Amino acid sequence: MSFSAPIGTVEERESGKIWPGRWEDVTGYDKLYSLGYHTGADLNLNFPHWDANAHSDVFAIGDGTVTFADLFSTQEWGKLVVIDHGTVDGRPLFSRYGHVENITVSPSQPVGRGEPIASVGNGEGLFPYHLHFDISLTDILRSKPGHWPGHSRTLVHAHYVNPQEWLQVHVTDGVTNLNIFIAQAYYVIATLGLRVRQNHSTSALQVGVLPFGSKVTIDDTATVEQDSFKWGRVSGGAFNGDWLAMGKADQSETYLSRFPPG
């Protein structure tokens, strides 16, 4: 069975990048915050404008059967969709999509990978627009679609996994190839810092600057030579999916190093 991200354009989802495009996880799995330890990812998109994710499509990550698709509570989740994907790697697999709106599926309905199931909502006004997405390797969500371990980290680890890591291992391009992205950490050693651009070109829109000494993660499977520079795509953080010049294409100058400047 192949899997893909629950958000993004067709091209972004089929790229195998988790998280795709400029989508970012603003909370993170196992992070302790006011509601307890987080069970999954809070996926958000603020490009090309704030709340660009609002009302955008949410997709099933893989083939399965819907077990819940309704308003759960106006005081907690808002609307939820839960999908049973059967047995994967010898364990049950359930995916949950929280705070959604415009649900287009019903319980007991079979769905396919990439099928629209709802759109990004705000939990009936409870939260800013975003998609809460998590993956459970138990059947807890079958009987308790709104299950929330709160401040019990033990229960989070017992029922949920890091959805980014799980998807990145299991994502395929829908045909034959497993897309594994190799991300490497670098440090900016250019004295004046590095301009971050929307694309791999000196004429592309500048979206920010990384100062000298900054740590940045680069997807080493996505480097491009253009305009006499070698360009790398940023993986994670505020500039996820953007590009920066790693150095001159002829290797006469280098702007990033695997080691912090001394």
Image: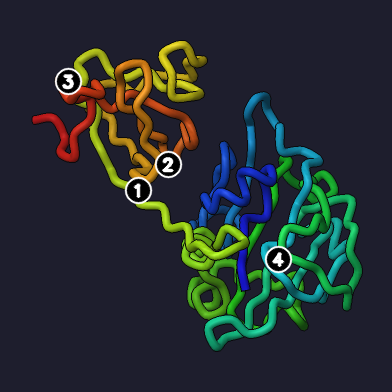
Residue under pointer 4: 96
* Precedes in sequence: disc 4 or disc 2: 4
- Say above or below: 145 vs 56: below
Q: Is residue 27 above or below residue 156?
A: above
Residue type highlighted by circle 1 = Ala
Front in this rendered view, residue 252 or 42: 252
Upstream in sequence: badge 2 or badge 3: 2
Q: Report which residue position mark 1 lands on.
A: 183
Q: Quadrant of the N terminus?
A: bottom right
Q: Nearer the viewer, mark 4 or mark 2?
A: 2
Name the residue located 55 percent from the left edge and 43 percent from the top edge: 24
Residues at discs 1 and 3 in contact (Cβ within 8 Å): no
Q: Is residue 206 left or right of residue 7?
A: left
State how far apart marks 4 and 1 are (Cα).
27 Å
Asked whether 210 or 241 is in front, the reply is 241
Which residue bears the numbered disc 2?
235
Residue at the bottom extreme of this rendering: 90
Asked if residue 26 can be seen in this view, the reply is no
Callout 3 amino acid = Glu
